[in-house]
Image: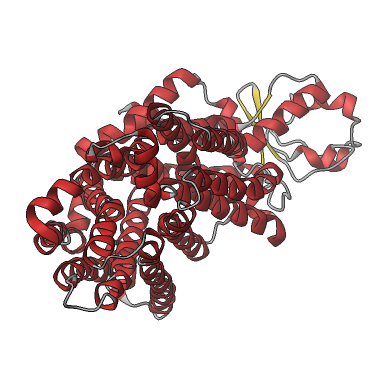
Amino acid sequence: MDDQIVVHGSIERSLAAAEERSAKEKAFEPQSHPRPSLSELSETLDDIPHEAIQQRYEQPSNSHFRRVNSKTIVSFGPDDRDNPVKWKKTRKLLVLLTGIMQVMNSTVGSSICSNAIPQIAKEFHITNQQMLVLPISIFLIGYIVGPLMWGPGSEYFGRRRPLLIAFIGFMIFTLACAVANSYTSLLVFRLFNGMMASCPIAIVGGLFADVHDDPTLRGRLMAYFMACTTFGPVMGPFISGFVADVSWRWCFWIGLIFAGTTLPLVALMPETYAPVILNHRARKLRKETGNSNIVSPLEFESRDIRTTFLITISRPFRMLLHESIVSLTSLYLALAYAIFYLYFEAYPIIFQGVYQMSPGVSGLMFLPIGAGAVLACFVFIWYDGYLARAKARQASWANIEEYRRLPLACVGGPLYVISLFWVGWTASPNIHWVIPFLSGIPFGMGYLLIFMAMLNYLTDAYETLSASAQSASSCTRSILGAVLPLAAKPMFDRLGVHWACSLIAFLSLGVSIVPFAFIRYGDRIRKTSMFCQELKRIKEAERNGMAQDIRVDDK
């Protein structure tokens, strides 16, 4: 079987197999022996195959211990306060707030200079129109490279360390952009800024999953996370449109101030990744007892870091090539994402060119997109509740995987297409600016519904491999998002506003059939998917292993 499948579930299968052998051993009886001191624990661990050691520890904890071959595996107990899903609400709220603020910093940073381009061009004497798109496009190139580094890194070092390092780096390169003395240096700093900014985009979804095991609540938090990825870019033109009149550098100074207010939250956020927390616990126990056989589940796995890292890096590309769900979803999201960033070039053409607005006022034209995103969140929450009620009354359709998320994309796709035709054919000096202005509402609503539905569908379909599936989608859409805006100025000059908007509307109409196709053929596609079927077998093996664990521990 491919290495990319073996990584997931290997620990559980190893534990289950080893414990089946260990089941024949007689469990240690705590009632017949006094509790040992800490100095005696090292010797005791080697003699206890399946009992929770904390019952005999002089300072009991909630840890659970299992003997596997010569190793003692430490894991969370049922009421372990160090387990992120058992944390208090205030601690979870800190994680939520920190994640959302980091995403807002990253996404605002992507478009923070969009309405300051004329001032930047004037200072650095840039006249080439394609060159003027680069401050935003090259930031998105950082979004391509960054997740390949931060995602796997968070699986070895935990969530907190990469997020803190990346956020400090984000602040440093934002400062560098503010003091850049050439256009080339500005572009280089924007590239590294994008790489740093991609860290929360890649990790925050996992951050929420670490601390919440309720699928309904987790889905709603993901909706808020994706809403932030829409609100942030919309705020950028609004800020730069007014600030650039003072100096384009103040766009980045304001971004740095915003980041400075977020830094204390990032610094105070605790580690949330359970395998890394258990690594720290096992390391502490080894130091206290002198027993080198105490390990965490992650340490028990024999695969070396280099091999696992290479597998993790290559898996998204293999999924993109061989998995129809991943490739078609990535295509749909890539086009929607690219059009979203193309709007940062198209809106100045429409509202500054057709309606003669100032950069500051034209930046306000993005606000209906944010309003549409808010409406999309309400629709998501309503549908989530509707689905829960349908499951409660045992409606047959509610158990079909494709119906859990995709109907939202079936609504969002047509809204997205309508908004493109709307803005294209109403942007005229003879029509009041409010009419194309309002087209942003269905645009923002459709855009976010598409993303919430399709990304959650990837998560549902690939579960433990969903990070790789979403990395494939992220890289694809970042590539198109960086390239398509380069064509905005030539396309609008050649075709005009009406037909340029119509062209991207027809392209969006073509790919909007993807969620409908998944509803019709998704079950058949998943049955022929190597990844989906192997994940199904792994889940069955894990359930069997867990059942064996319960039977052994009860002895």
From the top left corner, tell me how far across and down residue 342 is, in percent: 26, 52
Q: Give the camera-side residue of 401 and 15.
A: 401
From the top left corner, tell me how far across and down residue 163 is, in percent: 57, 39
Left or right side of 156 for 368 = left
Residue found at x 43% / y 75%: 378
Q: Quadrant of the C terminus?
A: top right
Q: Give the camera-side residue of 264 and 88.
A: 264
- The quadrant in which residue 403 appears is bottom left
Q: Is 60 rendered above or below residue 517?
A: above
Q: How is the image coloured?
A: secondary structure
Residue found at x 75% / y 23%: 286
From the top left corner, tell me how far across and down residue 393 is, in percent: 40, 81
Number of marks: 0
From the top left corner, tell me how far across and down residue 481 is, in percent: 28, 45
Residue found at x 19% / y 78%: 431
- The quadrant in which residue 360 appears is bottom left
Q: Is 146 rendered above or below residue 118?
A: above
Viewer can see residue 463? no
Left or right side of 551 for 427 = left
Viewer can see residue 110? yes
Q: Is 201 rendered above or below residue 41?
A: below
- The quadrant in which residue 357 appears is bottom left
Q: Quadrant of the N terminus?
A: top left
